[in-house]
Amino acid sequence: LSVSARAVRTRDGAFAGAALAYNDVTDFMRALKVKDEFVALVSHELRTPLTSIVGYVQILEEDPAIPPHAVEQLRVVHRNAERLRRLIGDLLDTAQRDGSPMPINRSDADLAAIVVESVEAARPTAAGAGVDIALTAPEQLRMSLDAQRIAQAVDNLLSNAIKYTEPGGAVTVRLAADERDVELEVVDTGIGIAPDDCDRLFTRFFRTEDAARRAVAGAGLGLSITKDIVESHGGRVDVESEVGRGSTFRVRLPSVG
Ligand code: ADP
């Protein structure tokens, strides 16, 4: 039960009594408990065994006794297990916070190195999808940020750009800074997004019909988490897009965090 009280006064301000409001919050508390149980279940029953699968697959991939064709198959297992691991992470992030701000752990970091690493990690996927990746970035860009979370945001934008671009297309990543702002652009020549959808893109679980129709894998969580990460750093993320021509996702962060 939640109780709130308010003093009731006469027109000349004298105390006349008190108004008490009783609110039954049983359903709310029950919902909170269900959510906590869900988060615990997903963490233990899904994430823990998956971590062990990824670990053993990695060991087998490096075992010289394993024949090459089996190593190829193990790589597929590994890739898909990683995809599940990311999805579980995104689900936990979304359920745990449930609208509250994302906690950020800032330290001195090099944003240029984070972006370079993210682009390098995406190269095999891009090559597999027949998509070219180009990067322009300064040598170094030191600033105070949560390196892990910012890397997650860059990975999300980059993997979307590759995912939603046809073979033969290109993704261009640009990182630039002036005295006030840092700007990261992820430009693709992909399927594009209709103007109405652009407004809803950053909401949880939203996917365009086009994406769903093309059976591109995804849960619609990446962009909402990306937005939370950028905003919790005092920045903004937006999109410009044209159907059939491609999209530009732009992240702006204040230089002094
Ligand atoms: P997911 O990609 O897992 O579905 P996101 O939250 O990352 O989830 O993206 C939400 C939706 O926004 C996608 O389903 C897709 O419809 C659209 N989208 C995101 N990035 C792009 C892009 N670069 N080009 C076209 N559509 C995109």
Image (cartoon, rainbow, N blue to C red):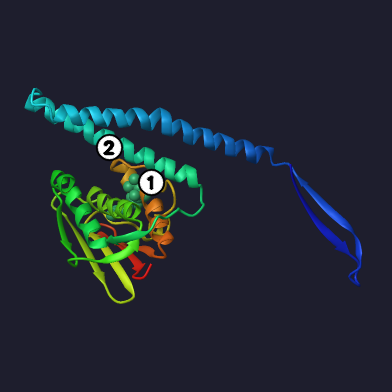
Rendering coords of residue 62 (x, y %): 13, 30
Viewer-closest of 110 and 92: 110
| Residues at marks 2 and 1, CA–CA distance in whole angstroms | 17 Å
Viewer-closest of 44 and 195: 44
| Amino acid on which the number 1 mark rests in the picture | Gly
Q: What element does badge 1 sit on?
A: loop
Which residue does the image show at 34% across and 27% down from the upper left? 49
- The mark that comes first in sequence, 2 or 1, is 2
Rendering coords of residue 188 (x, y %): 22, 58
Q: Which residue is mark 2?
A: 82
Q: Is mark 1 within 8 Å of ligand 1?
A: yes
Viewer-closest of 87 and 241: 87
Q: Which residue is mark 1?
A: 220
Specify few, some or many for label 2: CA neighbours under 10 Å numbering under 14, 14-19, or 20 or more.
some
In which quadrant is the N terminus drawn?
Answer: top right
Q: What element does badge 2 sit on?
A: helix
Which residue does the image show at 28% across and 28% down from the upper left? 53
Which residue does the image show at 30% across and 40% down from the upper left? 217
Whether pointer 2 and pointer 1 mark residues with C-beta atoms closer than 8 Å, the reply is no
Relative to 39, is 67 on the left or the right? left
| Amino acid on which the number 2 mark rests in the picture | Glu
